Image (tube, rainbow, N blue to C red):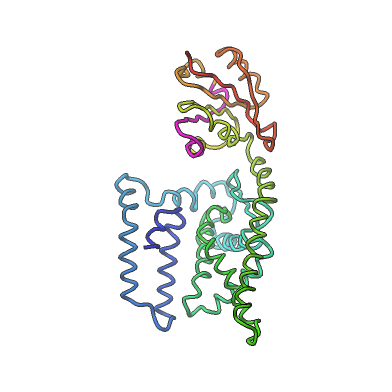
Amino acid sequence: MALGLTQYFYEGGRILYPLLAATWLAAGFACWRPRPSARGVLLASVAFVVIAAPVYVTLAGQDFPLFDRLEKTELDDLYWEREREPDTLGTRLTHFRHSLLHYVNSPENTLYHYYLYYGGKYALVLPYAVPALLLGVVFAAWRWRTPGVLPLIWLLGTSAGNALLVESAVTARYVVVFPALVLLIALGVGETLALLWPRRWPGAAQTALALILALALAVPGAVYYYGPFLDTFNVEVRQHVAYDVEDALLRAADFPPGTRVYVLVDGPALPQTDAQHLLNFLADGLRVFVSAPDEFTAMLDALPRDTDAAIFFPPGDNTTLARLTGTFGPRPVTGSPHDDVPISKALWLFYVPAAG
């Protein structure tokens, strides 16, 4: 049943987890003693199909692709046409190596995307936890003939899947492996402690020490994330966009329902669909439209007047400001109230209440 529920998650998990379970059980029939229960595997398969079927029936009934994201992000022809790298086995092995390094050594970096999901200075596992992770990998590999090898297969399978994509180090595609990373780190700590712990010492003290080590691994990670990481991220993420559209949407969240939000930007920006999804998350009843300033001003006279209009445009764009003032009359122009947004990237707001 749990495996079936993975089909309602991110598409990477929908593909990875059934393949992972099938590989793991197939290895079990070949290597484990005793072998997995054939009856149990059959029951698990039936439960998986029953739980997972509705999502695929719905997709097929609506004539949607079963794996839409995969079709958009796999070995994209446009990527190769730009001759970024040859489409060879060596390229795939390089991507696989890059994926493995993303766990322990290489920060997130992309060639194709303008936006970083994680960024920062470190890989997915912070440096102080890397030894525990590598020890866990060794202990899991040592158990290759037992079910305990699952987290290692999980990790390698995630990297193999990412190696087949255009970008092999996009952190959002590694969410599926986070539990395995935690399991391997825990395995590294627990098994190393058991090997080094003198038998004459009480087991309760070993448990207490294991708990202390777990906190020593977890707490610094949280401190790093909510401190230095977010400070760095707030700088990095704005380096890849001309203007901070997310800031404009955060400012728009308190507008009255029905307000039409216009975001006027040239160059890289938050796509229309993503902007609407973010605004839907922040507030109800708001519509957002992302376009270039000249495209917007060309249709200015046709704008609906029966709803409020919040118009965000680049700072210093006096041409757009003059066009807005000429159409709607003089109105206050406000900048961002958020101190961490660079002035050069914070859009100006021109707010027009509904007529009457």
In the image, residue 185 above or below residue 283? below
Residue at 35 percent of width and 77 percent of height: 37
Residue range highlighted in magenta: 276-296
Residue at 42 percent of width and 84 percent of height: 33
Residue 164 % position (x, y) = 51, 58
In the image, residue 64 above or below residue 223? above
Reply yes or no: does residue 292 show up in magenta: yes
Residue at 44 percent of width and 72 percent of height: 24
In the image, residue 320 above or below residue 174? above
Left or right side of 137 for 306: left
Left or right side of 125 for 10: left
In the rendered image, which quarter is residue 125 located in? bottom right
Residue 143 % position (x, y) = 52, 79
Residue 154 % position (x, y) = 50, 66
- In the image shown, does 167 or 8 lie closer to the viewer? 8
Reply yes or no: does residue 114 show up in magenta: no
In the rendered image, which quarter is residue 348 located in? top right
Q: How many marks?
A: 0
List the single residue furthest toward the bottom.
200
Q: Quadrant of the N terminus?
A: bottom left
